[in-house]
Structures are given as C-alpha cells and as structure tokens.
Amino acid sequence: MLEIKPIFNALCRSKVGAVLLLIQIAITTAIVSNAAFIIQDRISYLNQETGYPEQDIFKFNVMTFGTDINLSQQFELDESMLRKMPGVVDAALSSSIPLSGSGSASSFNLKPAPQEGLSVRAAYIFIDDHAINTYGVNLIAGRNFTEDEVLVTNEITQKRTNVTIVTKALLDELYPDGDGLGKIVYFGDLPLKVIGVIGKMKGPWLKDSKPDNFAFIPYIKAESYTQVAVRTEPGQRATVMKEIENAMLANYSKRVINNIKGLDELKNEYTAQDRLMMRMLIVLITILVLITALGIFGLTLFNISKRTKQIGTRRALGARKSAIVSYFLVENALICSLGLALGVVTAILLGKMLMQYFSVAALPPSYIAVTAIAVLLMSLLAVLAPAKRAANISPSIATRTI
Amino acid sequence: MLQMNNVSKVYQTEMVQTHALRDFNLQVNEGEFIAVTGPSGSGKTTFLNIAGMLEPFNEGEYLLDGVNVGSLNDNQRADLRNQKIGFIFQGFNLIPDLNLYENIEVPLRYRGIKANERKRRIEQCLEQVGLASRAKHLPQQLSGGQQQRVAIARALAGEPRFLLADEPTGNLDSLMARQVMELLEQINRDGATIVMVTHDSELARRAPRNIQVVDGQLADFTLYQGAQTIKTASGV
Amino acid sequence: MFIHYLDLSWRSFKRTPLVSFLMVLAIAIGIGITMTSLSVYHMMSADPIPEKSSQLYSVQLQTMDDGSTWWTEDNMPLQLTYQDAENLLNAPTSEKKVAMMRTGFSVYLDSDKIKPFIGSARMTTPDFFSMFDLSFLYGGAWSKEQENSAAPVVVITQEINDKLFAGKNSVGELIYLDDASYQVAGVINHWPLNIKYYDLNNGAFNQVEELFMPFSLIKAKELVSWGNSNGWKHENTPTFADKLQSEQVWIQFWAELNTLEQKQAYQNYLLAYMQEQQKRGRFNRKELEYKLRDVNQWMQYNNVVTEDNKILVGLSFMFLGVCLANILGLLLAKFLRRAPEVGVRRALGASKRQIFLQHLVEVAMLGFIGGMLGIVLAQLGLMGVGQSYDYYENLATMDLTMLLSAPLIAITTCILAGLYPAWLVCKTNPAIYLKSQ
C-alpha cells in the first residue's frame, strides 16, 4: 500500500489507457445496475403467485355452427360429460379465462348506477357454481354458489343474477373495514350480494392496475362462441387435452374445438414480451461484464509487456513476486474505484432517465452497491492472471537489451 | 548543397533546457563524403535528424539544395525527404513484416512510382548490394551485415542525392563493417553525397572529410585530405 | 495505395492475432447486440404503407361527456360507436372511407373433405381493399349495392383459398360461415403485414384476417366484436339493437384524405356532424373534439414500439460505447507499439496523412470484419427473439437496410475508435524511434 503514490504517478503518465478503462467500468456499472433492477422486477412479476394451479388447468374454445340444438342444453350435456372424463377434476363454461390477456372489466359500485358512489374497477367472469373447483382457488370466507343461484340462459329473461364471489383485494377496496361479506355491491345497476371471498386469484390482465380485483358472477349465457375451462388431476392434463377435441365432437359434431391451451401457456403468451426483455437483458449484462473483463485483461497484459524490462529490473533490485502482483492489483483497484465512483453517478443518472421517460421504478441504491462490488471483484480477478505472469518475469531480462 | 547557418536546437524537459545544437554552421558540397564524429551526447544524432528533416530546429537557417527547410510544412518536408534523402541507421530499421523486396519498395510507394518502375529499381538496388537472390526473405532471416545492405539498398532505391548514415556499422563486426563501408564509398563514387555519423575513428579516417561535434557545436576539422577540401571548409 | 493499405492491415492483423481477434470480437458482439435490438425496433417502427401512410387517417371522436376520462394520453376513445361509424360512412362526402370490426366464424364447405375450422373475419366496406393497397388474385371487392343490402359475399385470402379450393379460382363458389352460405367475391394475394396498423386492438403484431365481408352484415347477423368493446357510462344493452344504439365504442374508422384541402373539408365535416349530434343530446361537451391521425402517428399514439424495445435499443448503444472504449484501448496499445516502424516510414518519406490513412484503413478493416461477424451474431440473436414469441417471428428479421447498416455502424464505430490512436501514432516524433534501442 506504500506504493500508491508512485503507481498513481505512473497512471497519470499513461492517462488515456486509464481513462478508457475508467469509462468502461463506469458505463458497465451504470448498465448492469439498472438492467439488474429491471431483470429482478421482471422475475418477480413473472413468478408472482396467481392463485391457480396453472399446471393442471387448460381451456378450449367451442364455436358451434349447427342450429339444430338448444345451446344451453348442449352445454349442460357437455359439462357433465367433461366432469365424468377420467382425469378431470371439474369443468365449467367460462366467459373469459384468467391470465389470458383477454376478458371483461367493469366498475363495481356501492350505489346503483347512475348514482355516484365509491366505484372500484374489477375484472369479472360469468361462470357457474363449479368456478371455485374448476379454477382450484381458495375460498377463505363465505360459501360457494348454489346451483339455483346460477342463471342459465340464451334468451333475455327478467330473472336476474343476485350474488357474487369476489377476491379479498376487491372486497377490501370496496369495504375497507373488512366487513364486506354479505353486503351488496352494484354491477351497473344490478345489486349483487357478496356470498364468498377468495384469498388470491389474478384477473385476466397481470399488467392491469388492479390485477387482484376479480369477481365470479353466476351467469351462463350460451353463445355460439364460448370458452370452457377444465381442471385435471395433477399430471393428467396432457392426456385430457389430447382427447378433448374428439370427446367434444363425439357429443355434438357441428362445431369447431380450438385453442386448446394450458393456463400456464396462456400466461406465457401474455408475458412473452417481458420474458424476452428479461432474457435479452441477462444476455446483455453477461456479455458486457465479459467484455469489460477482457478489456481489463488485455490492457494489463499490454502494460506488462510494455514494462517487461522495468519489472525485470525491479525483480533484480530485490522486489518479491508478491510486490509485483500487488503493484498491478493496486494500479487496477485505483482505476476501478475511480471508475466506480463515476459509475455510481452514471447509474443514478441513467436510473433517473429511465424513470422519467419510461415506467421504470426508482433504482434502489442497493443495486448500485452490489453491482459496484461485483465489478470491483471482477476487475481484480481479470488482473490477477496477467499480474501473476508479470511476477514470473525473470530478473535477467533487465540485463538484456531488447 | 546543404547549408546550416547558426542552427540551434533546444530540448525542453520539465526542469532543464538542453542545448543539443548551438549556433551550428556547416556547408556540405555536392559529392562529398563526410564523417561526423564526437563524444556521446555531443549532438551528432540531433544534427543528422535535423539534416534529414526528422526534427524541427529552434533557431537559424537550413538550406537543402537551396530550399529553406524552415519554411516548409510537414507534407513538403516528407516529400523532400522522400526524394532527396536516403537514411541508413545503426539498427537497420527494416520493417520486420515486410520481405526485402517490400522493404525497399516502401519509399518508392510513398513517392507514387508505378509498379513496373518500382520493380526495375528494386531489382537494380538488390543487385547493387549483392542480395538479388534473397528478395523474398524476411529481415530476420538475414545476418546483421546483410540487413544493413538491404537498408542501404532501400536508401538508394529512391535515387537520393543525399545519404545520411547514423552509425551504419555500429552493430556489425569489423569484417562486415568494412564491407558496408566499401559499399558506401562505391555509392559516393557513383555521385551521392554522404554524411555519416560514427564513433569509429578508423572508419572516420576513411572518409575524405571529417568533422567533429562537441557540445552541440562544430568543434574542429581534422584534415587528412587535399587542399581543396580545406579551402572549402575554411570558407564556412 | 488503398489496396496497399489493406494489404498492410491484413499483415498487421495476422501479426497480432490475439489482439486482433479480441478487437473483432468486441466489435462483433457490440454490433450483434445492437443490431438485434435495433432490427426489432426497426421492424416495429417501420412505415407499413410508406406510399400512403400520410394520406390514411384514423378517425377518433370525443363521445364522452365532460368529466369522463379514458386511458389514452389525450383522453380520446380509440374506436367509434356503431352509430357514429354508420353515420360517417353514409356521409355525402367524396373521400374513401372505411368502417370495420374484427370477428370470426366457423368455416366449412358443403362436403366432408375439409374439417371445419375457425376463421377470423374483418367486417368492412369495399373501399378497404384499395385504401390499404390489397391486390386481388381472383375477382374483386363486393359492390356498393351488395354492401348496402348486406349481401352474403366474402373475400378470402390466398391461404384460405389454397386450403378450401386447392388454389383454384373460387370466385362464385359458396363457403359456409357459421349457419349460412356466402359467395366468394374475390381472393386477395398474400398480404405480408408486420404491423396490423389498421386495427391494433388485438395486438400490433397479430395476423391479418382470413375473411373480409360487408360491414352491413354486423347488423344483419348480430355479429359481436372479437376486439375490444368499451363503454364509459353504464348502459343496459339487453338486445343487439340496443348495443348498436349505445355509446359503446367498438368500430375502427379510417378515411383517405389525399390533399390538405380534403383534410380541411373533412375536419369541417366532422365538427358539423358533432354539432348536429349535439342537438340529439349526444356529445355533451363544452369543446367538441376529434382527432385525425395518419398511419405513423397512429402507431406512435398506440405505442406499437414498446417501452422495453426503446430501453433495449438505448442500453445496446451504451453497450456499443463500452465496446468502442474497449477497442480504443486495444488499438492504442497496438498502434503505439508500432511507433518504431512508423518512425522508419516517416524517415523514408511518408507524410503524416499517409500514416494516418494507413491506420484508418486498418481500423476500418477491423470494423468490416467485426460488422460481418456481428451480422451473424445478430441473426443468432434474432433467432432467439423469434422463438420466444410467435408474433415476433416476422419482426425478428433483418431487412436490407439493417443488413447494410450493420457493417456501416461497425466501420463508423471502429473509425471513431481509431481516430485518436491513428492521430497519436502519426504525430509521434519519428526521430526518437530511429536510434537503435
């Protein structure tokens, strides 16, 4: 450590190389810390708990073109057939499918429309009393729909739905005191009594501002184009998915079955861009760190070959090998700490810019700190090998003229 | 053809000023062979570098073939160097990646000479130094004496009127040194003017005119040859 | 002389293979990464219909009452209500215009040869084909009369024609869509569209529809949208007729306005239309608002290029900057080590300019090799991108512009990196290197 001053002086004499390395380290620190933060953000977004056993659920679309049947009756036949299929836990017509990126949302109010009152946006699906079992979600309070409460129709009738099961997140927003169970919420001007609460269940859009606000409404409107959700025993899904088209067509043939997809697959499609971003950033920072390490490695190598004679002379004058190694380590650490200081500032600026122009959250300082330490370690590692090589330069080099 | 009047060169470092040349006066005439001697650090090489326009000088006047060098820009100096001056160095300074042929080609390319004319000249020069059969060899495949002959061939290729040699035999054993010296004498007889820096007094004595540089100044004439030379020198 | 410099550069490349390789690798990786993200960005932001993009305008009307808000940056609904679309369509103005909506049918023939499948359909008006530059393989668009009478006609894509009719001229043939038969009026040529700019509801990179049918069939067949239907106030719409009369927005509308005068006239018309509608109690606003956005403005407004892409492009260029610094360092080392040779060349009559050029040619060559290798890396990167997302397959390619700009960017980067080292080496005093070391 006594050597810092002469090392520093030597550095000042070969500024350009040092400055270049410094810039590399600074930009690397800035990119890596910000990218790591975005990556971490995406990882937690992609791995978030959805409330569903995604691996066991799949959906398919039914498009009926035959006109010689009553759709409502046909769907009831289909449902009971599906529920009896080996490997199937439960199945239900579902007006849209959670996590799929397509669905319906409305405002749920404490007063009937058009009166003004507390209004909360939430996604909803029309589904029957098999909803909870089909989606494998956890009812934490209240009860399920009864069969009588489900309105099944493909006609316009005067009968109206009057109950709902909602997520805790939605209910707590409407009734912040936690006493919402059994109370009324308005779906437009339609009063619905909250009879059950589900702990966690994500709606159709993970990117929604309120992804946890979700409601089941017991209503089956038989339409020619509809979707069906199916839950299977663990490990049975692939088999059931293969059989589903034939089973459905055997029940009634004038229709098309398509879009047979697992819930996890739907989620993957919805999050494809995020996964892509995450992967590209991981590739980017990995290569970036490698390139910077190579840069440090190359520059040290060059410095050593330039100073071969000098190192030989030092050795001849009695310097130990460890002194030579530490010379290069200290030299590198000096450049690196300056680079890191600049890098921290750049990282903060870049983070501010990303926050200003894009919907990226503020960069936590811990990311910069960890990145800085990692870059420092990486740079020391990159110097170690060439420095050891330098230490092995023979003192006799000094006496020869090159 | 070369005339220096009161030329001075100062090296400025952080702390000290070093006068490499002080009020240096010299006239070299067409066809002369001059040996420059002097102790180490006396300014011999600085004189040669200035003569070859490799280094600028601080004060005074330097005329080469009547051209005032001080008034030229870098490109003009490069052209003048390329056309009129051939260099021979102690360390040969052949370019290691290029074979003999290509090494000799370098100055010709900078002069923009056409390929077939280049070929004719290079072959002629290699012939002249006795290395015609080794045109495709790389410098490191040759002995020191051979390398210096290639360097001389390279200096001759541009058909310069001025040959500046800095310790051309410094790295050679005495036998090879003699061969190189004989080659230089031959070139001088063919019409080129030669200025050779050396610290080998035996070699210096073979040159018709000797000058000595001490402390950046032309200190003394050592006259071995005829009256004509003395006359010229004293005229300076 | 250039050829000679290239020759020298190549020798120099071979003399220090490791350093040269590192430099080429650095530039190749930098270019590879930058080109990967830039290509995707380029394909996403490329003008999908360059010869007409400034004449096609998406029409937006501010139908919401004062005080209601939308999620768009200017608070405007993205689509029109059915009634507005129908009114604008029937307006006695001369420009081409199109109202449309995406839906779908089960498609089958009167035989068992083809298994029924689901086809997506665009319900639109006959101007659609000429406005968006579609060309016909067989037949053509349906007539104005057929449009007005909700005739059962359909234009199909080449792909569907291959599937149903083995590629033969199917004009006049019947196909079944849901419960009715429709006559084929035309077959359009393959329509390669990277960005489905005319309807961004289902995602900008979704595929184009397979069937094109009269807009008037929406009402006749009570067709529901496969895109978005949005409302801003509570309305009970138990019947389809209610929905058609509601304030829900679910129809896309475009107008082709070829001159400034035409655009001005259309703007006047839109204002007059809204004032007219105000008398019926709609457009309850102090200030009437409409928006005409051309294709590129529309794509920008809808954020077709995602934020992620912009961030990636930015970070990639910073990455390229690191590579540049890296190369600069290595070039500096390499060139300075060559100073003695440069000294000899200077002594032999090379001018500074010649030395400078020699070194620039050398870095340009490094850039060229690196750029070529970078294209290969970018192709690998794009393959990865294409596989990660179905819709990205068409986007994750390099068009000619990108292929040409890769070596160009590489060479520019290298020359930028090489300027300083080349300048440094050409201005060094040759004299100090000539004396034997």
Image: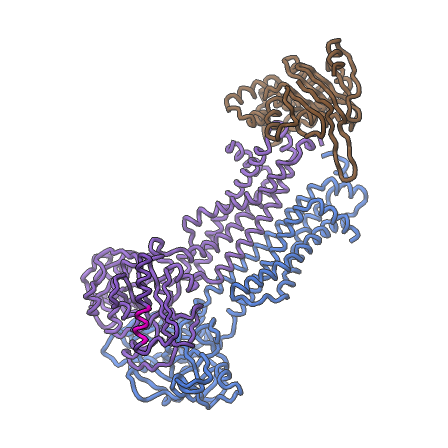
Q: Chain C hue? A: purple
Residue B145 within the segment the image draws in magenta:
no
Q: Which residues are magenta?
A: C271-278
At a point 73% along the width and 20% down the height, the residue shown is B26
Above or below, B25 against C355 in this view is above
Does residue C319 appear in the picture of this structure?
yes
Q: Looking at the rendering, which quadrant does residue C241 occupy? A: bottom left
Which quarter shows the C terminus of chain C?
top right
**Quarter assignment of residue B3:** top right
In this view, the residue in front, B221 or C75, is C75
Percent across and percent down for residue A368 are 63, 62
Please, which residue is most extreme toward the top here? B227
Q: Is residue B13 left or right of residue C406?
A: right
Instruction: Please provide percent x and percent y for residue B8.
Output: 74, 28
Q: Is residue C406 above or below residue C209?
A: above
Residue C206: percent from the left, percent from the top? 37, 63
The residue positioned 31% from the left and 57% from the top of the image is C258
Chain identifier matching the blue colour in the rendered picture:
A
Q: Residue at x 39, y 57 (%)?
A: C394
The residue at the point 45 percent across, 79 percent down is A121
Q: Which chain is brown?
A: B
Q: Position of residue A262 (x, y in %)?
A: 42, 71
Q: Is residue C273 inside the magenta stretch?
A: yes
What type of secondary structure mainly makes up the magenta span? helix
Instruction: Kindly tell me whether residue A229 is visible in this rendering.
Output: no
Left or right relative to A338: residue A237:
left
Q: Is residue C179 left or right of residue B187?
A: left
Q: How is the image coloured?
A: by chain
* Position of C15 relative to B159 (above/below): below
